[in-house]
Amino acid sequence: MYQELKRECYEANMQLPKLDLVVYTFGNVSAVDRANGVFAIKPSGVPYEELKVDDIVIVDFDSKVVEGKMRPSSDTKTHAFLYKHWETIGGICHTHSTYAVAWAQAIKDIPNFGTTHADHLTADIPCAPPTADQLIEGDYEHNTGQQILDCFAEKKLSPQEVEMILVGSHGPFAWGKDASKAVYNSKVLEEVAKMAYLTLQINPNAARLKDALVKKHYERKHGKDAYYGQGC
Amino acid sequence: MYQELKRECYEANMQLPKLDLVVYTFGNVSAVDRANGVFAIKPSGVPYEELKVDDIVIVDFDSKVVEGKMRPSSDTKTHAFLYKHWETIGGICHTHSTYAVAWAQAIKDIPNFGTTHADHLTADIPCAPPTADQLIEGDYEHNTGQQILDCFAEKKLSPQEVEMILVGSHGPFAWGKDASKAVYNSKVLEEVAKMAYLTLQINPNAARLKDALVKKHYERKHGKDAYYGQGC
Amino acid sequence: MYQELKRECYEANMQLPKLDLVVYTFGNVSAVDRANGVFAIKPSGVPYEELKVDDIVIVDFDSKVVEGKMRPSSDTKTHAFLYKHWETIGGICHTHSTYAVAWAQAIKDIPNFGTTHADHLTADIPCAPPTADQLIEGDYEHNTGQQILDCFAEKKLSPQEVEMILVGSHGPFAWGKDASKAVYNSKVLEEVAKMAYLTLQINPNAARLKDALVKKHYERKHGKDAYYGQGC
Amino acid sequence: MYQELKRECYEANMQLPKLDLVVYTFGNVSAVDRANGVFAIKPSGVPYEELKVDDIVIVDFDSKVVEGKMRPSSDTKTHAFLYKHWETIGGICHTHSTYAVAWAQAIKDIPNFGTTHADHLTADIPCAPPTADQLIEGDYEHNTGQQILDCFAEKKLSPQEVEMILVGSHGPFAWGKDASKAVYNSKVLEEVAKMAYLTLQINPNAARLKDALVKKHYERKHGKDAYYGQGC
């Protein structure tokens, strides 16, 4: 029944090793089917080179398995939480990509230093503080979702505009209209994280991109008069 | 009619992912046909793995589409401006390659630290200041071309000798006698940007290459008595 | 007689170049057969691209060759020492992977900065001090094993929980239930070493991961109620 | 007549792009035939992907072409000088590999920080000062050879033990018993240069490897009682 959804999820997951975003099993992608209230997600701990379409697990928004023989990703509850609260997103990708993790471990937002960043979002890439101890000891993966939501609320960010976040001491989550776009955003985040790191090494006093350029680059790709791409 | 021009442009574009100069669609190459007053350029937002020769767009020096069904690169007006004002150049390449972007975001010229640099140009690689706000809000991509020209005028540089620039807060542009040479210069710039970054990490007081070596290395490749290469 | 053991050892060794953990012959993996009191190890100085299953050497725990025509790895006595004293380990891997060597040369433990680290061990990755001069001039490779044991004793670490170490001024050793797991741990160590390096570059005051997260991430993969993976 | 020599030279050159030691034409390898007083060297400016065995040029120790239709490498006189003065070496390799060039541009010796370095040489990797101006304006490539010899004389180094050098502001030269060993040494130099760079980033006060370890690691590979490798 969910064959197409599983295939979308499988193909997005298989992009991760090709894009150098994961080693071994350090990542997972999911794809949602909102009409049926379920999403497809990578099974836990299965190496990408062994992953098959039929290994993909279908779960509902309470993380209960609906179809599939394998145990879903240990991060399933974080995905479920985000799908439940952010109704516009269609795919989520979590990795431990190197430069994004380094910023997360440094517990620092990634400053918007240039047009590569502004082509994708106007804000700094937020780094949520590490989850409070009692929430870690409670329903940890569910609470990681809450942590992401709280960070967006506090910084007044919208998940439609900012499609990525760092969870402090942990690593990046990204999302988008579908699973493939979530993977795309994960790659953009890793690349922007590397550029920002190098920028500060070359010039520790590097300034944030000025407002006129932030606006211009974001608008030409995402504004109502966008002229980037083929308009489809 | 422009089949050969399209192929030159296509093949130069396809070099970018092979040389690790782009991820996704973060770059574009063009090739000029001066006899006909047109140039060929990558269509906007098309991934390299899907790009076909027939997708290449032919535009004139006012950026009007002459042939092709797709929308040309969003940076087309910058290319057109440079072709119009610099009559000796035959190809232009723009990327968001990692180390070149880091220097652009740091808003710093890349110092000429060694013979790898001096084999290609004697000057530091210039970083143009970010475009003024009113020019960003105006005809932005056209004005980016103006920004490049102004920087060359101010620094008294010639586009025949210096075939590359960083646009501050944005990234690199390179050019050359044809599209293939423009891509070559983009790769050289990225490599020299990485070497200069590492040099300063090892020795923050590293000195510019001394004049005798700058001259020797540039002249043996580009001077009237050049003896590098096969002389053809 | 030891064909299966040789194959396990061979295949684990051949993972090293694929995982970018070695250049040339800078590494070696062994696999133990405790029932017969022997282990299989890479022959010394043989390039990976020429290595064949039958080149693998079988030695006993006193490093005497039991089967095989080639000279075993020059590090054989270190492997033998560790197998003799740590009865739970089934495979050992030694490399000169770049970032792990850099920390070893800096003679610094790798701090536990994030969940990627805590998914694998709770402690900092220990760096044993360089071996004392009289032990270097004595039975050096045997004494390197002793150095590793002494470091674990001093830091009160268990080889079941901490499956990796840096030997100061030298490089990493890792182990596990079999040779394949030892290689896995070597790759994890290299990746964690790179992340920790970058973390300190971005934030020289980066703090160790807090206890609640250390415990949560380690336990969800390795605790008695672990829920990562497929439980097999 | 020199078919075998050309093939040795060709194959050694073709290793450079595979080992990530060159981009485009930024490198050259030669192989000597001492019985005939000639050496084979890469033609100048020919891309590796187009290079053929028959393109290799045979020159004598005065850099005169003996066989071949193409112009030899612009660095030919440096090779000739070293073959003439160092009678034990059989191959020379020059590259612009990234980390070695960074140290050369920083005009710093690479300190012997660990056993990876000491497995190959006991000394720091020397960085010759940039050539004096009047020697650059004279017979530059010949004088670069002189510069290398002078540096070895001043530091009391032997080309049998130390098979690599950095030429300040320029880049690395390496040599060995044959062309293949010269390429091997170039790769080792690049890897050791990267490790030393990272070591100093992690610990700016990192100390040189202590004498007992320098001696032990060098001797076990190169001493009269060497026990590394298969003894052939």
Image (spheres, coloured by chain):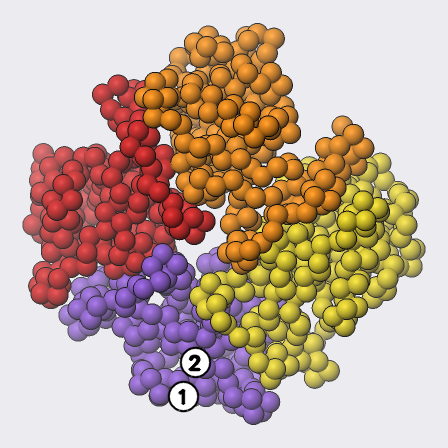
Chain colours: A orange, B yellow, C red, D purple
In which quadrant will I find the C terminus of chain D? Answer: bottom left
**Is circle 1 on the same chain as circle 2?**
yes
Q: Residues within 10 Å of mark 1 (few under 14, many from 20)?
A: some
x 67%, y 40%: residue: A119
Q: Does C216 sit left or right of D24 as displayed?
A: left
Q: Of the residues shown, which amino acid type is indicated by label 1?
A: Asp
Residue found 49% across the figure and 35% down from its top: A127
Q: Residue at x 53, y 75 (%)?
A: B207
In front of the other: C205 or C54: C205
Provide the residue designation for mark 1.
D150
**Residue at the front extreme?**
A154
Residue D206's disc is: none
Q: Is residue D64 visible?
A: no
Q: Nearer the viewer, residue C30 or D12?
A: C30
Q: Determine if residue C37 is in view.
A: yes
C-alpha span from label 1 to label 2:
8 Å
In the picture, residue C130 is in which quadrant?
bottom left
Is B85 rendered above or below residue D138? above
Helix, strand, or loop for circle 2?
strand
Residue type at mark 2? Answer: Ala
SS of the residue at dot 1?
Answer: helix
Question: Where in the figure is residue D4, as x and y percent of width and height?
Answer: 46, 72
Please say if D52 is above or below A218.
below
D46 or B80: nearer the viewer = B80
| Label whose residue precedes the other's in the sequence (1 or 2) | 2
**Mark 2 and mark 1 in contact (Cβ < 8 Å)?**
yes
Describe residue D202's horizontal placement relative to residue A113 as left or right. Answer: left
Q: Of the numbered discs in the image, which one, if any, rests on residue D128?
A: 2
From the top left corner, tell me how far across and down residue C29 is, in percent: 25, 46
Determine the residue positioned at 9% across, 43% down: C84
